[in-house]
Amino acid sequence: MAKLVIRRLIYMVPTMFAISVVTFLIIQLPPGDFLSTYIAELSSRGDAVDTRLVEALRERYGLNDPIYVQYYQWISHIVLQGDFGDSFLYRRPVADLIWNRLGLTIALAVATLLVSWAIAFPIGVYSAVKQHSAGDYAFTFIGFLGLATPNFLLALIFVWISFNYFGQSVGGLFSPEFADAAWNLGKVLDLLSHVWVPVLIIGMAGTASLIRVLRANLLDELRKPYVTTARAKGLPEWRIILKYPVRMALGPFISTAGWLLPSLIGGEVLVSIVIGLDTTGPLLVEALISQDMYLAGSFILILATLTVIGTLLSDLLLAWWDPRIRYAEG
Amino acid sequence: MAVRQLPPDQPAGTAPIEAAAATDGGVAVAPQWKLVWWRFRKHRLAMVSAVFVLLFALVGVFAEFLAPTTPDSYSADHTYAPPQGLHFVDTSGGGTRFGPYVHGYTSVRDPETLARVFQEDESQRIDVGFFVRGEPYEMWGFIPSDRHFIGPTDPEQRVYFLGADRNGRDLLSRIIYGTRISLSIGLVGVALTFVFGIVLGGVSGYFGGRTDTAIQRVIEFLMSIPTIPLWLGLSAAVPRTWGPLETYFAITVILSVIGWTDLARVVRGRFLSLREEDFVLAARLDGCSRPRIILRHMLPSFSSHIIASLTLAIPYMILAETSLSFLGLGLQPPVVSWGVLLQESQNIRTIATAPWLLLPGVAVVVAVLVLNFVGDGVRDSADPYR
């Protein structure tokens, strides 16, 4: 197991390098740089642009250097000093802006993942065991609908319903009185009373696909001879199902965490904008639209890193769960 | 085994043995696409969905003709006008009159909010007809016409079957025009995905070894990045000065940059399993060239799987475009796509006053749903020998 962990950690290094290069390219892609945007803004306001000031800024941000030097400057500041550069939009260091929001994003993603598992597990088992029952068809239909509905649309519908029928506007993760308060028990309880809405909306598509995966796997397992053997031995039915086939079918369930995480983070971006959560989503989109590329790039870099770490964790979890994988790779 | 592959509508009444012999012969000589088709036809849900897909396609192709008006025809007097119900029997004036019509609006100012509030006015009657003259347009950009499939018989009147948006533009017409853009984004994107996926997956599976490892690493890498932030980053880099057509192609390229990985995996898997088959060895010993082995011998045996993967990829493209445009980072107005339309319903005040602006979302959900069902049906019938 230790060998497996170490090998996986080493695999991560080139992936992280590739992610940082891609992120840097995204930062560089828009035509011009943030100084030229800044100058354009200044001159459109009618302010005089001091060429010496511009040159000084250019020098300070290293914009005259070749691109690989710029990349090295950028990444080494991040890795060695935790300095993500300055946000052009907010005139503040990026690091000050993002950590709070990232915490909420991570909390939301993890909560959504756990809730998805908790919902998908019983439904998936039920649908497979009672295949072709009315309940199975109902869940399959809801599942298809959940996969086909973009989650921002779900959020919009939810906002409309709660406004129209309950007369309240949903939004935010906290009630007004707790929004700026320090963390205490009351604030945590308040958070819990708000958080289920975004969690359900973000988790809809993921839960639907988890149910389908678990159902398909369990159906395959249920047809195998060892189930017949267990039944012939006279084991109670619930025990047959839970002890053997469900355990076998859970492997793919665990490994889905890896690919579910990117889509959860992506869905979170969209849903947060609709229901106004203070997570990374709205700030990321704002940064991208105004081409505040250091801020946007930092978000993309960190979100991608988190996804890679999440995938790593789910791989390790799978290896811990399934000895066949452990032995094949260890 | 053969009995399961029978087409469902075999002529009944003949002696069972004769029938079996005859159909056995039919199954034995039927080309593969026919076997696939027979299987697909049994899939009731997929067949119904296929009809819907066809309808969507027709709406996309004949958008100009089907829409009651053009998507940019606006009317300041009809800001957020609600949907008008279509009536067929008019008994208001004592007698009974047949024929489709809608009621007109009376608008009053809300004394508190000063917002315009529309009410249906039962006394007004706007006749609606088929194949009427209306707003002039150019069919497919080159056939000038002013015939509309449905619309008010008096071209001076305006009807809003699905309501109006903030500029008093007809939502139904905009959804119909959006169908063209949204579906074609799916198709063009999938075409690009197809090229990337086939070439890279094929190379990966056919050559194996180090090439395979390299391409697999790239695929794993692309899959590990959260797609939406990456898409957002790439599409934010599309210059705002680009015209609608350039943006359109840039967005499809961005979507397929990520989308090809799935297809490449399917193709690679198929290649790996087929490479060891006897008929490939036989072809090689016969002295066939590599391209001929791939294109003539291997490709036909997994083309149905590729078609299934492609069908399943289209709805994801549509969803992705919708999400990007919804955030304002995809297609830009005046281009009309479902995502661009949904962008208007982004804030709660708009949804509260004009909930019908969520209707383009219904189009998205239905289109994605039926495309998924068709894709599932194709996938299930892709291997007729199973």
Image (cartoon, coloured by chain):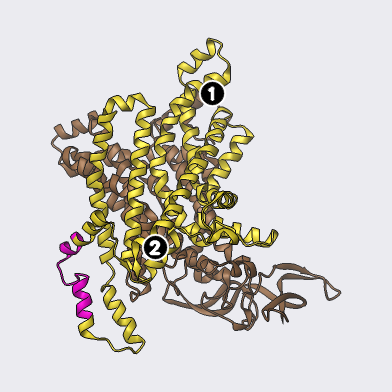
Q: Position of residue A245 (x, y in %)?
A: 47, 23
To which chain does the residue with label 2 belong? A
Q: Quadrant of residue A165?
A: bottom right
Judge whether A244 appears above or below B174 on screen: above
- Residue that appears at 32% across and 59% down: A298
Letter of the brown chain:
B
Judge whether A287 appears above or below A216 on screen: below
Q: CA distance from mark 1 to mark 2?
A: 77 Å
Name the quadrant of the N terminus of chain B.
top left
- Please state which amino acid type lies under the numbered disc 1: Pro
On the question of residue B311 being in view, the answer is: no
A24 left or right, relative to A206: left
Residue A97: give its label.
2
**Secondary structure category for the residue under label 1:** helix
Magenta range is A54-72
B339 left or right, relative to B127: left
In front of the other: A133 or A183: A183
